Amino acid sequence: MKIIAWNCRGLGNRPAVRSFLELQKVERADILFLSETKLKERKVKNFRWILGLANCLTQDGDGQGGGIALFWRNGIDVSLRNLSKYHIDVDVKEGRGVSWRFTGVYGESRADQKDKTWRTLTGLISNPVMPWVCGGDFNEVLFSYEKEGGVPRSQRCMDKFRETLEACNLHDLGFCGDSFTWRNNNRREGGYIRERLDRAVANEEWRNLFPGVQIINGDPRHSDHRPVIILTEKERGERNRGNSGPAFHFEAAGG
């Protein structure tokens, strides 16, 4: 299975829509999580048929910003647990009785509001524990070296992010490709900033279920964020037969 989480930075103009449809044409995601759609539910759901992802859940943002959506193919059993402006949390049932959780995350960007994201994530902790993977734009870095340029990231913000992942027993899954998933495209001297704001994390149960998982930081296209592409072991093998790809990087949260 292939899951993609992408901050698409709005779908209200033709270049953005063209990039969005090209992403799905090339990658053929089974589950696609979008953040910052900047569209109301009705307009987002209109994309289902041209994407080939007939099922959709959405949550509108505040005013003209925000907005998240989850699309998935027919034949995949997805059921909603809960959702908010920061996340969509679902159960996924595959053949042979295999079940796991996916949570698409869109983190708060304002430093004084980030605790809302962390409370949302810790509020999703469940018992009994299921295999669980989260992906998206967390709008935070784990370590200072995950940001270049601009004002250094607040140590408190990074610590709160790590503490949240530890509380949820979620660990960074690493990545292939570019180390930085967001950049401001400011070419002035001293004005260029890039950060690793987007990632995939999972608990031990999910990693045991998919030991060959691979994460790829994809082509940003029109957005200033790269999509995070989550490949299960089977999909990874298919891709690697055609393309050896870049080196794989693993960074454990809190380590």
Image (tube, rainbow, N blue to C red):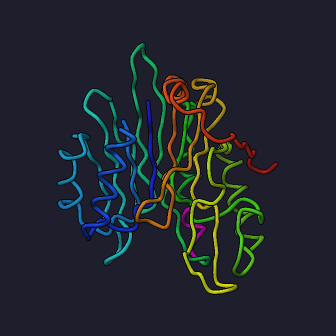
Magenta region, main secondary structure = helix
Q: Name the quadrant containing residue 97.
A: top left
Q: Is residue 115 magenta?
A: yes
Q: Which residues are magenta?
A: 113-118
Residue 220 x, y percent position in the rendering: 47, 59
Residue at 40% of width from left, 32% of height from top? 92
In the rendered view, tell whether residue 208 sits above or below residue 41: above
Q: Position of residue 134 (x, y in %)?
A: 53, 45
Q: Is 182 colored magenta in this rendering?
A: no
Q: Position of residue 18 (x, y in %)?
A: 28, 59
Front residue (pair 10, 13) = 13
Residue under the point 55% across and 36% down: 132
Residue positioned most to the right = 255
For the image shown, how many numbered marks are present on the structure?
Answer: 0
Give me the residue at 42% from left, 60% from top: 221
Q: Is residue 109 left or right of residue 77?
A: right
Snapshot quadrant of residue 249:
top right
Residue 225 shown left or right of residue 162 in the figure: left
Q: 81 or 186: nearer the eye?
A: 186
- Indicate whether 227 appears above or below 67: above
Is 32 placed left or right of 56 in the picture?
right
In the picture, the quarter occupied by the N terminus is: top left
Estimate the x, y position of residue 209 in percent, counting from the top left.
58, 23
Look at 50% across and 29% down and name the residue there. Answer: 242
Q: Residue furthest top?
A: 96
